[in-house]
Image: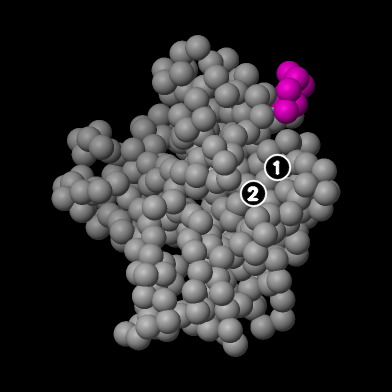
Amino acid sequence: MNLEELDWDALERLRGLFLEGKPVKTAYWRSISDLVSYNATYGERIGWKWDAVLRGLAGQGNGGWKPPLGPLLDFGCGSGVAGRRVLASFGPNAFSSLHLHDKSRLAEGFSADEARRRFPELKVETGAPEAAFGVGGPVTLVVSHVLNELPPQDLRRLVALARRATTVLWVEPGTFQASRLLISVRESLRTEFKVIRPCPHSGQCGLLAAGREKDWCHHFASPPPGLSMDSSWVRFARQAGIDLRSLPYSHLVLERCAEEARSGPEGAQRVIGRPNSFKGYLDILSCGGDGVVDLRLQRRDAPELANALENAKDAILGRWEVREGRITGGKIMEPAE
Ligand SMILES: C[S@@+](CC[C@H](N)C(=O)[O-])C[C@H]1O[C@@H](n2cnc3c(N)ncnc32)[C@H](O)[C@@H]1O
C-alpha cells in the first residue's frame, strides 16, 4: 500500500457508510480515487478473507474443490477484489469470461480495467448480471460484502440470480446481522444445492433451532504476516478504527447437484468461530448434521487435539469422539497440518 496515494477523505466517508450497514441511496463511488483507495485498504482486507475461503476450498476433499468451466459473475463488484481473488486461486483458464456487475458504472469500469491488466487473456464484460447467463456454460456467482446494502427487492433479485447459477461463492462480514442474512439466503437455496462450505451438511441450518437465536456463523481469516510492522497499514487501521489482527467473516459456497449427492463427509463437524480457551479446557460450538452443540474438551483428555484446535489458522473441520457433551478424542480434517 502506498500511503501517499490514499484519499483519506474518501476512506473516511466510505467508513461512515460501511458502519451504517444500511442500503445506500446516495452516490457511493464518486471518483476513481475512491476506488483506488478502497481497493488498497478495505478491499485488500476483504481479499484476505477470500484467501482464507479459497484456501479452504483448495484443501477440501481429494485434490480440492473446483468450480465448473463457464462464466464468472461478480455481483456488486466494487473495486473487483473478489472476482480477481477467485481468478487468481483457480487460474484464469478455469473460467470462460468475467462479468462484472455493480449499480455503479464507475466501479464496473475500474474493476474491468484491473481485471484486464491482471488477466490480459481473459474476456471481461460489464453490465447487467443476467448477461452472464446468456453466453453459455455453467455460471459461478461471486458475491462479497453486499448483503447489508441491499433493500429486500434487490436481495430477492440476487437470490433469483443465485438460483440460476451452478456454483455460488459468497463472503460477508462476520457480524451477527450479515451472518443471519446469509443463513436466510442459504435456507432459500439449500434444497437445490449442495452446501460445500462452511456447513458439513446441506440440511436446515442448526443455528435456526430454538435456543440458538443469539449465535451466528462466522470464522476468522489471518492477515499477511508482518502487517503490524507496516506503517501504512497501522495508520489506516488507526484511522478506520479497525483491529488488523481480527478478520471475522461469514461465508457460503454452494454447488448445484442431485439430491442424492448432497451429503457431506460422514460425521464431520465444523467449529463455529474459534475455540474458547480456558486454563484446563476449551469450549467449542460445533456444527454437524445433527445440529449445533456446545462441547467441552478437557485438555487432559486429549492434549494434542486441544493444541491443534487452539493453533488452527483457518476454519476447523473435524470428527470428535463425544461422551455426555465432552470431547474425549478426535481428529482435525481442515485445515490440513
Ligand atoms: C462494500 S462494497 C463491496 C464491493 C466488493 N464486492 C468487495 O467485496 O470489495 C458493496 C458494493 O455493492 C454495490 N451495490 C450495492 N447495492 C447494489 C445493488 N442493488 N446492485 C448492484 N450492486 C450494488 C455497491 O455499489 C458497492 O460497490
Q: Which residue is mark 2?
A: 196
Amino acid type at circle 2 is Ile
- Tell me where the magenta segment starts and ends, as one range: 131-138
Q: Nearer the viewer, residue 178 or 284?
A: 284
In the picture provided, is 299 more to the left or to the right than 190?
A: left
Amino acid type at circle 1 is Glu
Q: Main secondary structure of the magenta part?
A: loop
Residue 331 sits above or below residue 37 on the image: below
Crowding at label 1, few (<14), some or many (≥20) Cα neighbours within 10 Å? many
**Residue at 58% of width from left, 45% of height from top?**
61
Q: Which residue is mark 1?
A: 255
**Residue 131's x, y, as percent?**
72, 24
**Residue 70's x, y, as percent?**
67, 24
Residue 106 sits above or below residue 65 on the image: above
**Residue 167's x, y, as percent?**
68, 38
Residue 10 sits above or below residue 74 on the image: below
**Residue at 68% of width from left, 54% of height from top?**
264
